[in-house]
Amino acid sequence: MRKKTSGSAELLWAFGATGILAYGVFVTSVSPTLSFSAQPSHHLVLLFVAVRILVGVLFVVCMLNVARVPDTRTSIAVIIGVGLAVRVVLLFSEPVLEDDYNRYIWDGALAAHGVNPFRYSPEEMVEGRGDSGSPEMSGPDAGPVVEGINHPHIRTIYPPFAQAVFAAAYLLSPWKLWGWKLLILIADSLVVLLVLRLLRLLDLPSPLAAVYWWNPILIHEFSNALHMDVLVLPPVLAALILVLRAKTTAGVSVLALASGFKVWPALLLPLFTRRSAGVKRERLKLFVLASVIVVLVFTPVLVTPLDESLGFVKYASSWTNNQALFTVLHWVVSGVSAPFTVSHDLALGMTRVLSSVLIIGIALRLARRPILNAPDMVRRMLLTVAWLFFLSPTQFPWYYTWMVPLLALWPSPALLMYAVTLPLFQLVYRWEFLVWIQHIPVFLLFLWEITSGKTFSGLRTGNHAGSV
């Protein structure tokens, strides 16, 4: 028998659906005044952030009551319909306080004209030091895109498969955003379908898909800010489905291919190879297979100069933004190394090494023990990605989207709270202390969850409501 929801739960979710839709309309209406080119006032940015926080609170309250939503076709239709509607509305918005999309368009134009986007920076191309591939690259339509690229002296950081999608977007609408918006919507929709498939495999209630499909951070970062991180989610989830269906070799291969969209899925390879029959030789074969795939995928990058003008190298060596725990690590390293008169740059480099060692060490530790069952696999994936985010030198809000599909499969109240705190990122430029407000409360609650054994209580139903 299907459970019935209470009247209060129905009212709450109706309010949540209305709030999500109203948010989409609000963003679309004010977005022309909140673009970088519009130079929005501080008061308008404050209003925008306040609305985002309010929607985040509403979302978290709804998700904390998701267990009260009946697992019926009507419920799923409403969840999917509302999420799709807000995304369609946001197709008509302009990116708010964001300009990364200019790099996507530029890279796509290069790739579409047969130029390796990893070989030349936009600055080199504009100055005539690179092969343009076509007169269109220096035409009038290209001008606004080039002018909007941040860090134009750096060669692209986006992996080869992402470049292929950028090229497809360019071919759909040269120098315009519509092709890219359409491809984001398709990828985003594919993710929610894969989440629904995984919920069935895990014998979990389908309304948990709202954790992904209604998440306001994810909606903003994909459907308005147009970040490309959505591209990596379908192959990661497809790899998980394959592994859960005992197709480990195929799953590991797909996960390795996912690194062609973003590098971070490679961190999950030890966990995925652990899903094999348990024979060390078989796990080693899988790891070698994955390594070969990754190297082949990154061949267009490896044939170019691997210096600090390359985005991957620059990011790994010096990029920091919106970081909290990384700053604490930097304080520790600076304090310990102070008697040795270590320079600031060297201390920062040592901190990056320490952060990387911690991230890799946690990933290996989570993959050390045999995986008990499918929920245990999901839980370890979520913990791996969460620790990656917490310890990263760059805690951009769109990096949080990496864990959101997994939150639908193993909801964490702590990590859901980021829907409330991450909008403060858009005010850090004025008040740096807001970095700590974004991350520390969430991190402390996260630590309590994973140490108390009461993680995710109240959110999960069915047979998989186990502790950490």
Image (tube, helix red, strand yellow):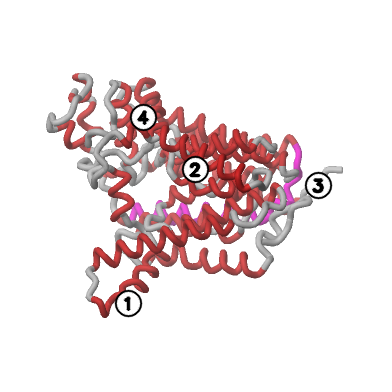
Which one is earlier in the sequence, the residue at label 3 or at label 1? 3
List x then y, in percent, for residue 151.
24, 44
Q: Is residue 11 left or right of residue 319?
A: right
List x then y, in percent, for residue 182.
45, 28
The correct choice, above or below, for 121 with respect to 464 in the image is: above
**Nearest the eye: 35 or 169:** 169
Q: Are marks 3 and 1 in contact (CB under 8 Å)?
A: no
List x then y, in percent, for residue 10.
71, 48
Residue denoted by label 3: 4
Q: Which mark is residue 177?
A: 4
Does residue 446 show up? yes
**Separation of residues labelled 4 and 2 (CA atoms):** 17 Å
The correct choice, above or below, for 220 with respect to 350 in the image is: above
Which one is earlier in the sequence, the residue at label 4 or at label 1? 4
Which one is earlier in the sequence, the residue at label 4 or at label 2? 4
The correct choice, above or below, for 66 with respect to 457 in the image is: above
Q: Residues within 10 Å of mark 1 (few under 14, many from 20)?
A: few
**Separation of residues labelled 3 and 1 (CA atoms):** 58 Å
Circle 1: residue type: Gly
Q: Secondary structure at mark 3?
A: loop
Q: Secondary structure at mark 4?
A: loop
**Separation of residues labelled 2 and 3 (CA atoms):** 29 Å
Magenta stretch bounds: 43-72
Q: Which mark is residue 219?
A: 2
Q: Which mark is residue 335?
A: 1
Q: Considering the image in quadrants, where does the N terminus appear? A: top right
Circle 2: residue type: Ile
**Nearest the eye: 303 or 197:** 303
**Separation of residues labelled 4 and 3 (CA atoms):** 44 Å
Q: Is residue 51 magenta?
A: yes
